[in-house]
Amino acid sequence: MPRRQSIHLEGFAHANPIPVACRIGSQLHTGVLVGRDPVTHELPEGLDAQLANVFAHVRELMRVVGGSTDDIVKMTFHLAEYRDREALNREWAAMFPDEEDRPARMVLAATLDGGALVHAELVAVLPD
């Protein structure tokens, strides 16, 4: 097996020739995670629905790599509406309910295309 492992998810792929994530040892880094529906591959119109899909992709990714959301060190979100964080905070608190046990988070303003309202990425340290 190569030192660097490309990670792919069923029902989620990029338009460009890149994996969803890359793992070297215990380090896991993603590319952009978007809010496409994993079944229809369509991008829902609202931020709430897109964020629900993003967080579902995160859960599935962590399951596929043999980890859990407890292994996430940092998440970065790119929002089309920078200050519109209500849905993000709701999904965030659901995934990380313990205020004393949450990863770092950064939110950036972004110009996104194709109807996307959010892009996300994460860094995780997986069990050996």
Image: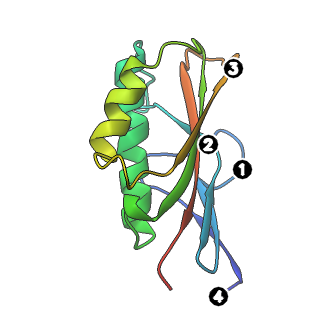
Pick the front one: 114 or 3: 3
Using residue 26 as the reference point, say whether residue 92 is left or right of it. Answer: left
Packing grade of label 3 (10 A; few <14, some 14-19, many >=20) is: some
Q: Which residue is mark 3?
A: 110
Checking the image for residue 95, the label placed there is none
Q: Position of residue 4 (x, y in %)?
A: 70, 76
Q: Secondary structure at mark 1?
A: loop
Give the amino acid at mark 1. Answer: Pro
Which residue: 54% across, 13% down?
83
Using residue 93 as the reference point, say whether residue 16 is left or right of it. Answer: right
Which residue: 39% across, 62% down?
70
Q: Are marks 2 and 1 in contact (CB under 8 Å)?
A: yes
Give the amino acid at mark 2. Answer: His
Q: Are marks 1 and 3 in contact (CB under 8 Å)?
A: no
Q: Which residue is mark 4?
A: 1
Q: CA distance from mark 4 to mark 1?
A: 20 Å
Q: CA distance from mark 2 to mark 1?
A: 7 Å
N-term mark: 4 or 1: 4
